[in-house]
Image: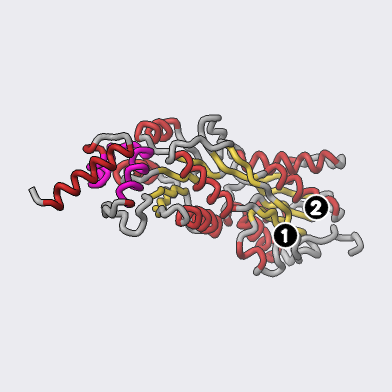
């Protein structure tokens, strides 16, 4: 047996001893086998990297890979989240693998199968709903995960990062009330989603606080995308007693409202004030610039990434469910209600 082989085995034994595992487990990690828990894999990979071993598929990211699973990639909202997660993970020497499930059942299953075979250390999930079967499979594989902006109440055992949607809805509506608006419509997201309900509840609370009765005819449920929001905005603006302001559940829906208003010869904000939610990059470039509720998307994903690294390292986050603050950004799309002095 040559000296190099003897030294290599000796080093693997040292690594196994330091990690508290068997030499065979170290060998599995070294050769990219998936039948090792995420926590153990992460510990062994770091030690292997320190001893100069090259891990399969890890040339650029010796700290390992993290899966980022999201429904859709075709909007700036997704880009902001990915940017935040990637920057946080780069600081840990980890890489990011992005999977878009597009709400199709075959792809919704595919990402879970891929995750089990790629040897990823953990997952950041931005999906409509984490099913009970998916959660059980993640736990069976020993893969830690964090949910960003959960759509439903995932329960106390599921770590998550979101934002203060209720406060955002309240603040946006209160801003419009202070400008003298009384006919304030809302285009929100799907009725079953936590973010939709929270923003709608904030809207209702702001109206109730000043004694304005909530008019169900002024509330529409979309899906946070452009075309349904356009049709909802068109219906609202075609009412005999149309609203003078619209609070949209996200910036994409606000943009659709602009389009519907323009098609009817209505000026923003002279005839119609519009508030969005998210503060995506285009909000400050469209005309007029969009008043919106800033949601710290990149920070949310970065926080989720840091929580995930803690879980991978066997540490429990101080707070498993985090909500980052939203804030109102006032720009040009809101003004006094028609008939009120500027």
Query: Mark 2 and 1 residues: CB-CB less than 8 Å, in contact?
Result: yes
Instruction: Tell me how far mark 2 sits from mark 1, CA to CA.
Output: 10 Å
**Secondary structure of residue under mark 2:** helix
265 shown above or below 221? below
Q: Is residue 233 magenta?
A: no
x, y (%) of residue 288?
72, 68
Is residue 21 or residue 342 the one in the foreground? 21
- Residue at which label 2 appears: 175
One can see residue 256 in this view: no
Q: Compare marks 2 and 1 and give the one earlier in the sequence.
A: 2
x, y (%) of residue 106?
36, 43
Q: In the image, is 105 to the left or to the right of 295?
A: left
- Residue at which label 1 appears: 291
Quadrant for the C terminus, please: bottom right
Which residue sits furthest right? 341
270 shown above or below 276? below
Looking at the rendering, the stretch of residues picked out in magenta corresponds to 26-49
Chief secondary structure of the magenta portion: helix
Is residue 212 or residue 112 the one in the foreground? 112
């Amino acid at each position: 047996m040559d000296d190099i082989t003897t030294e290599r085995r000796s080093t693997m034994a040292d690594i196994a001893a330091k990690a508290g595992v068997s030499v065979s487990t170290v060998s599995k990690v070294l050769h990219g086998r998936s039948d090792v828990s995420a926590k153990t894999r992460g510990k062994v990979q770091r030690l292997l990297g320190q001893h100069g071993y090259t891990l399969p598929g890890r040339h650029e990211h010796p700290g390992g890979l993290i899966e980022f699973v999201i429904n859709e990639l075709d909007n700036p909202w997704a880009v902001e989240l990915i940017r935040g997660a990637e920057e946080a993970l780069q600081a840990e020497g980890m890489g990011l693998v992005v999977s878009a499930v597009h709400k199709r059942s075959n792809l919704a299953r595919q990402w879970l199968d891929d995750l089990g075979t790629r040897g990823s250390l953990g997952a950041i999930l931005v999906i409509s709903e984490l099913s009970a079967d998916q959660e059980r499979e993640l736990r069976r594989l020993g893969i830690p995960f964090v949910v960003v902006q959960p759509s439903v109440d995932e329960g106390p055992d599921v770590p998550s990062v979101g934002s203060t949607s209720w406060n955002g809805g309240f603040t946006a509506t209160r801003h419009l009330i202070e400008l003298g608006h009384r006919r304030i419509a809302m285009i929100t997201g799907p009725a079953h989603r936590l973010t939709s309900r929270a923003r709608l509840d904030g809207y209702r609370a702001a109206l109730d606080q000043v004694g304005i009765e909530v008019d169900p005819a002024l509330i529409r449920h979309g899906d946070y995308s452009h075309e349904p929001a356009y049709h909802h905005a068109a219906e609202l603006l075609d009412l005999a007693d149309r609203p003078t302001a619209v609070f949209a559940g996200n910036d994409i829906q606000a943009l659709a409202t602009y389009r519907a208003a323009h098609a009817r010869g209505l000026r923003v904000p002279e005839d119609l004030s519009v508030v969005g939610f998210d503060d995506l990059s285009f909000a400050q470039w469209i005309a007029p610039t969009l008043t919106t509720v800033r949601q710290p998307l990149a920070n949310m994903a970065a926080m989720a990434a840091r929580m995930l690294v803690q879980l991978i390292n066997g540490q429990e986050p101080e707070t498993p469910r985090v909500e980052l603050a939203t804030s109102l950004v006032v720009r040009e799309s809101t003004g006094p209600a028609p008939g009120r002095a500027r």
